[in-house]
Amino acid sequence: MTRFLELMNFDVAFSNFHINSYFVFVSTGLIVGCLILVYRSKELKKYRQDLFFCFLYAFIGIIIGAKLFYILTILKYLILNPSLWLHILEGGLSFYGGVIGGLIGALIYIRQYDIPMWSFLDSAAVAIPIGHAIGRLGCLVQGCCHGIKTDCIFGIIYPQSNAIAPSSIMIHPVQLYESCANLIIFFVLLFVSHRTKTKGLLLGLYMVLYGIVRFALEYLRADFTVKIFIFSIPQFISILMIIFGVVLVYGKYNQRIETLISGKNKDDE
Amino acid sequence: MENKTNTKAIASLVLGILSLVFLFVIKEFGGLIGIVMAIIGLVLGIQAKKEVDASGEEGKGMAIAGLVCSIIALALCVLGVLCILICAGSLIGSMAVLG
């Protein structure tokens, strides 16, 4: 595994920007996610151009949200050491910030051009986990978002050449756990999407499933971050996400039953 | 009467090209300026494409070209400059921990 990580971690510089393994995995994740979003749903076939444009709005939201959220998580250190602000562009991105920013970007487009919101959000809920699963492999190879020290059989040792993850000690491959969990969530959502027409259910299900996975995995992660009570910010957001997801699933499920009883379709009202 | 070219399409194309220039040519803060320009170019390009499709104005090609330039610039800026030292808990984190 150490040799594999060493081989996969490349960095090619062109002029003043670099193409590294993280770049390749994240771009592949974004492209696959975008293609699944645009081409999977038969219901949204006539909105394909809008879906692509909506993805672009979401992409802008992802960039801004992911960066702002990352700044928020390390704000304490930035205040203590103001010289770090000069390197702020070179730092990291936060997945949760990206999701919130992306959602706001997509909602702006949906509102502006009148796209069926729940159908779009359901399609996005299926596309996000597969893109995220691929993107997380970039984290694994690069060594960021790494786990805590372990002796278990799944533990990995990063090569000496890795500048981010601690080398020579066995740590949890949290990025790989999260990638696998996302892949499972993707297949679960794909399976459910073929069996239900209740709008909003897939989004709710994604929020609950990913919220649980992320909450649990935070205990295995070695990142330091600002804490709210006893929880880290991602854990706090996971709790909110699970609550919102449960309410959404419950609400939509009840609405579906009422619709079936009354014989009216209220989903797109 | 000759159709008027959509002004948002022209602006999108100009900003898309400028963002690529900033990305490749300007070293200091070029990436940041490039990102801002690409974002504005992208939003204008999308609006121009929708307007041209709806009204039949000229400038569809420009709108698409502006969109493509802005997408390429944004992708390169974000993934090539912003992610240079990767995701959460990387360099700044290590520097802060080490004091």
Image (tube, rainbow, N blue to C red):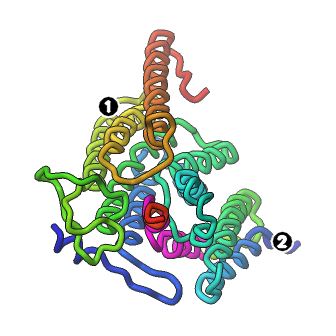
**Does the magenta run of residues contain B83?**
yes
Q: Quadrant of residue A223?
A: bottom left
Relative image position of residue A249 (x, y in whole percent): 43, 25
- Can residue A50 be seen here? The reply is no
Residue type of the residue flagged with mark 2: Lys
**Which segment is the magenta one?**
B69-92
Circle 2 packing at 10 Å, graded few (<14), some (14-19), many (20+), is few
**Does the magenta run of residues contain A206?**
no
Which of A236 and A160 lies nearest the eye of the viewer? A160
- Image quadrant where one finds the N terminus of chain A: bottom left
Q: Which type of secondary structure does the marked residue at label 2 adopt?
A: loop
Label 2 vs label 1, nearer the camera? 1
Left or right of A78 in this view: A249: left
Relative image position of residue A75 (x, y in whole percent): 58, 54
Q: Would you place residue A153 above or below residue B44 in this image? A: above
Tell me which chain the residue with mark 1 is part of.
A
Which of A71 and B70 lies nearest the eye of the viewer? A71
Which of A84 and A155 lies nearest the eye of the viewer? A84
- Can residue B76 be seen here? The reply is yes
* Residue situated furthest left in the rendering: A153
Mark carried by residue A35: none
Circle 1 packing at 10 Å, graded few (<14), some (14-19), many (20+), is few
* Residue situated furthest front in the rendering: B99
Q: Label 2, on which residue?
A: B4
Tell me which chain the residue with mark 2 is part of.
B
Relative image position of residue A209 (x, y in whole percent): 35, 36
- Which residue lies at the image location 37% right of the left edge and 71% below the top edge? A24
- Which residue lies at the image location 25% right of the left edge and 50% below the top edge? A177
Q: Label 1, on which residue?
A: A195
Left or right of B69 in this view: B10: right
